[in-house]
Structures are given as structure tokens and as C-alpha cells.
Image: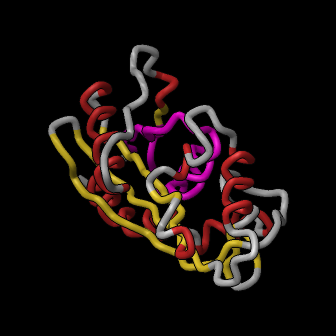
């Protein structure tokens, strides 16, 4: 049986990645652009989990559909965990991906230890409440310069085993990324919903 699932993100890059990750399941995907009266959820919670839950629940209530939402942060040891939950707006409210990357590289100039990790929280919600929340985390390090042409966000400065996300193809990244790990954890729950 095919089930209708709403993916609650306005970010086209994240949407593409999420579509690819849930593609093996027999889902009929719906997107926020199909809900013209729905305004983006304000991400004002103190954790990735709570932001993901808020986004999923608001969109599920509005649409009447089971909804999948995520929130992701880059946590850098030398910056005391920044940008963290402010990753999308690290360089300001109307900043670009490039603005965020350049700010990180500036702040880490002359810093040797560049350990970092990406973390994603994924929430699955029905209109009447949260069904499940999972997390994925991947350790890596911040490079000294941008490398690679693929991906989005901080991908060209976040390296795993010496290779940035932006130097990986989509299959490579989706095999090991923080978002992939979180989605893999929630897939068995989605599978149960499909089979019911």
C-alpha cells in the first residue's frame, strides 16, 4: 500500500536529499509548496529535536498528513559547539550558505584542532501528535578552505576521513551522512505505517 507523507521543509537542497533517502519506500511524497496558506515554522526551540518536532507537528496538523521534518546543526569543538542550532543563520538572518562557511573559516583561522560533528534530528508526526524522533551524528573536521562542488550548506568545509561532503557524490554522502543515519533509524517506523 502506498502512503501519503508530507516532507516539511522549504529548503530545496534538503528536500532533494530527503527524497533520495526515503525513495526506497513506497511513499507518495507531498511538499510544503502544495500548502499555499502554510507559513514556515519558527525554529525557536533550544534543541534540534524540539525544532524538528515542532516543524513536523505544525505541518501535520495543517495538512492532515503524516509528516517528516528534520533540523540539523554543525557543532564545532573550537567554537564551543557553535554554530549548533543556529547553523542556518550563523552569519545573520538573510545570510547565504557561502556567508556561513566564510564566517566559520574566519573564526577558525590559525586554529589547529578543527574537530566538528554534524547532527540531524528527524521527527515523524501525525496530526494528533509525534510518532517518533531519531537522530544521526557524524564526526569530522573543518577544512582550512572550501573543497568540492557538490552538496550545499557547509558541505565544502566539512570533511570525513579527509574528504569533504562536497567532494562526494550523492550516493557516497547519502551512505554515511548525519541526515542519512537519522533517516535510516526512522525507516522501520515508516515501514510499519506503510504496512498498516
Instruction: Indicate the position of residue 83 as horizontal and vertical percent values.
Output: 52, 58
Q: Is residue 9 magenta?
A: yes
Instruction: Indicate the position of residue 56 as horizontal and vertical percent values.
Output: 32, 42
Relative vertical location of residue 51 with respect to residue 147 in this rendering, above or below: above
Of residues 98 and 82, which is closer to you in this image?
A: 82
- Magenta stretch: give its range: 2-29
Residue drawn at x 47%, y 67% is: 81
Relative vertical location of residue 142 with respect to residue 92 in this rendering, above or below: below
Relative vertical location of residue 104 with respect to residue 163 in this rendering, above or below: above
Of residues 79 and 68, which is closer to you in this image?
A: 79
Q: How many marks?
A: 0
Q: Is residue 79 magenta?
A: no
Instruction: Indicate the position of residue 152 as horizontal and vertical percent values.
Output: 70, 52
Instruction: Indicate the position of residue 182 as horizontal and vertical percent values.
Output: 43, 65
Question: Does residue 96 appear to the left or right of 63 in the view shown?
Answer: right
Question: Does residue 46 appear to the left or right of 120 in the view shown?
Answer: left
Residue drawn at x 74%, y 54% is: 102
Question: Does residue 30 appear to the left or right of 140 in the view shown?
Answer: left
Residue drawn at x 45%, y 61% is: 120
Query: What colouring method underlies this structural image?
Result: secondary structure
Question: Does residue 168 appear to the left or right of 82 in the view shown?
Answer: right
Residue drawn at x 44%, y 54% is: 85
Q: Is residue 7 visible?
A: yes
Task: Tell me where residue 176 sits by quadrant.
Answer: bottom right
Furthest toward the top, the residue is 37
Of residues 64 and 109, which is closer to you in this image?
A: 109
Q: Is residue 194 visible?
A: no
Furthest toward the front, the residue is 110
Amino acid at each position: 500500500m502506498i502512503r501519503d507523507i508530507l516532507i516539511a521543509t522549504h529548503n530545496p537542497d534538503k528536500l532533494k536529499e530527503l527524497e533520495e533517502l526515503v525513495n526506497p519506500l513506497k511513499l507518495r511524497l507531498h511538499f510544503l509548496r502544495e500548502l499555499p496558506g502554510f507559513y514556515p515554522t519558527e525554529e525557536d526551540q533550544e534543541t534540534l529535536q524540539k525544532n524538528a518536532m515542532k516543524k513536523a507537528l505544525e505541518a501535520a496538523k495543517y495538512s492532515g498528513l503524516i509528516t517528516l521534518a528534520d533540523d540539523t546543526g554543525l557543532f564545532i569543538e573550537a567554537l564551543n559547539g557553535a554554530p549548533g542550532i543556529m547553523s542556518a543563520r550563523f552569519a545573520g538572518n538573510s545570510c547565504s550558505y557561502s556567508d556561513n562557511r566564510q564566517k566559520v573559516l574566519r573564526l577558525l583561522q590559525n586554529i589547529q584542532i578543527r574537530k566538528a560533528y554534524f547532527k540531524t534530528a528527524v521527527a515523524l508526526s501525525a496530526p494528533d501528535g509525534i510518532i517518533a524522533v531519531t537522530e544521526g551524528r557524524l564526526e569530522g573536521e573543518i577544512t582550512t578552505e572550501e573543497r568540492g562542488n557538490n552538496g550545499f550548506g557547509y558541505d565544502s568545509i566539512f570533511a570525513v576521513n579527509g574528504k569533504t561532503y562536497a567532494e562526494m557524490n550523492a550516493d557516497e554522502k547519502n551512505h554515511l551522512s548525519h541526515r542519512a543515519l537519522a533517516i535510516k533509524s526512522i525507516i522501520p517506523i515508516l515501514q510499519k505505517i506503510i504496512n498498516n
